[in-house]
Image (cartoon, rainbow, N blue to C red):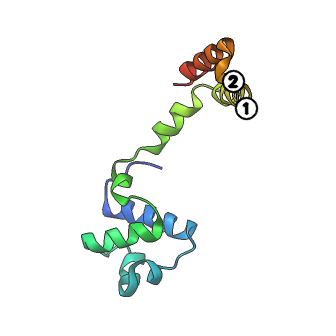
Amino acid sequence: MSTITTIEDFWDRVNELRIERELNWRELVGGNASLAAEKRFNPTLTRIFQMQEKLEVNLFNLASENQPEIEEQFKKNPETPKKMTAIYDLTRTEDWMNDEQIVKKVQELAKDIL
């Protein structure tokens, strides 16, 4: 997904979210359903807040979000899932914090992940 820069981009993203949440336009924007579907609805701030609740997202963050870059950061280190699994395995016992070697190993793995 690219950064939202136009009202049309905004409505395209809202439409994707609406479909994911299995909402119809009327459930999302009430009587302005046809305008929203045509990407011509200019909602008030109050309406945007109501839409956020129904979509369970912050629509203001969508305007500045650049998801491909964020996703790319996570894909850069293919070892991260393995390291997270190792941390999980090391910390499964109740007394793992009493073993200095385990604590150091967990710290090293966590440092690499961050």
Where does the image place residue 45, in percent across and percent down from the top left? 25, 69
Circles 2 and 1, Cβ within 8 Å, touching? The answer is yes
Residue shown at 43% from the left, 48% from the top: 2
Q: Nearer the viewer, residue 102 or 44?
A: 102
- Residue found 37% across the figure and 61% down from its top: 10
Label 2 packing within 10 angstroms: few (<14), some (14-19), many (20+): some
Q: Residues within 10 Å of mark 1 (few under 14, many from 20)?
A: few
Residue 66, given in percent of the width and then of the height, sits at: 41, 44
Total residue callouts: 2
Q: Where is residue 31 in the image (x, y as percent from the top left)?
A: 37, 88
**Looking at the picture, does residue 72 appear above or below residue 112?**
below
- State the residue in front, 1 or 22: 22
Q: In this view, does 28 lie to the left or right of 76?
A: left
Picture quarter containing residue 21? bottom right
Residue 38: mark: none
Q: Quadrant of residue 75 in the image?
A: top right
Amino acid beneath label 2: Trp
Residue 42 appears in view:
no
Residue at horizontal 50%, vertical 64%? 17
Is residue 11 visible from the viewing direction of this image?
yes
Q: x and y percent of residue 52 in the render? A: 40, 66
Cα gap from disc 2 to disc 1, whole angstroms: 7 Å
Residue extending furthest toward the bottom: 31
Question: Which secondary structure, mark 2?
Answer: helix
Task: Give the amino acid at mark 1.
Answer: Arg
Q: Considering the numbered disc 1 on the image, is that residue within a helix, a strand or a loop?
A: loop
Figure check: 71 above or below 29: above
- Left or right: residue 44 versus residue 79 is left
Which residue is at the far left? 44
Label at residue 96: 2
The residue singled out by tag 1 in the image is 92
